[in-house]
Image: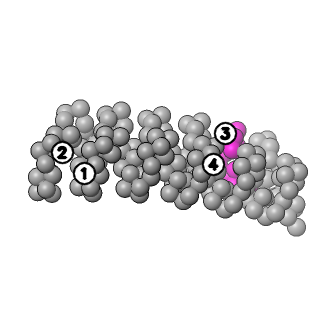
Amino acid sequence: GLEKDLTMEQIAVYADPKFDDDQMSEIRVGLEKGLTMEQIAVYTDPKFNAYQMQQIRLGLEKDLTMEQIAVYADPKFSDNQMCQIRYGFENGLTKDQVMMYADSKFNHDQMNEIRVGFEDGLTMEQTAVYADPKFNSAQMYQIWHGFEGDLTMEQVAVYADPKFNSVQMWEARTGLEN
């Protein structure tokens, strides 16, 4: 820390036995990258593992607001889930859009499908059809690609049913699109 021009006060923030070496490293990297003590305080908590700390640090470095970071700075989310939430904000999604998938009932693959659907221009109504943990990520993909292929709500409803696996959904979607 001292060789990187950190002050003793800054080093004292992470040189604490309550943090493991990886957590200490994430705190030090944030300080070295110029984050403020207030920003560092958001993730300087042993309830976060180093990978979770990294996701919070990356959001701070990308100038996400504290309100945006508060959506995912929660140990109930894995680092991969945090990453999907962070990507949504970084890619310009609204808080309402992100909140549709910022729920620990979705795994990170499901979160990714919901996020990418929004990024591709799906509406809240269209996304609500598949933003349900009863669908796995491969099923979600087939549903949102139906909307992307200009299928109507009624057409997508034909196969947006968890009793169909993703390959069956693909078959139905392909038939409807042709």
Give the Cα separation between the discs numbered 2 and 3: 42 Å
From which residue to which does the magenta span run?
A: 131-142
Give the Cα separation between the discs numbered 1 and 3: 38 Å
Of the 4 image quadrants, the one containing the C terminus is bottom right
The residue that mark 3 highlights is 133
| Mark sitting earlier along the chain (2/1) | 2
Give the Cα separation between the discs numbered 3 and 4: 16 Å
**Residue at 79 percent of width and 53 percent of height:** 169
The residue that mark 4 highlights is 97
> What label sits on residue 31 in the rendered view?
1
Amino acid type assigned to the residue bearing label 1 in the image = Leu
> Does residue 165 appear in the picture of this structure?
no
Looking at the image, which is closer to me, 98 or 130?
Answer: 98
**Residue at 63 percent of width and 59 percent of height:** 119
Image coordinates for residue 144, horizontal then vertical, percent: 73, 55
**Residue at 73 percent of width and 54 percent of height:** 123
| Mark sitting earlier along the chain (2/3) | 2
Image coordinates for residue 64, horizontal then vertical, percent: 44, 52
Give the Cα separation between the discs numbered 4 and 1: 31 Å
Give the Cα separation between the discs numbered 2 and 1: 7 Å
Image coordinates for residue 50, horizontal then vertical, percent: 33, 44
Q: Is the residue under label 1 in contact with that under label 4 (CB below 8 Å)?
A: no
Q: Is the residue under label 1 in contact with that under label 2 (CB below 8 Å)?
A: yes
| Mark sitting earlier along the chain (4/1) | 1
At mark 1, the secondary structure is helix
Left-right relation of 111 to 8: right
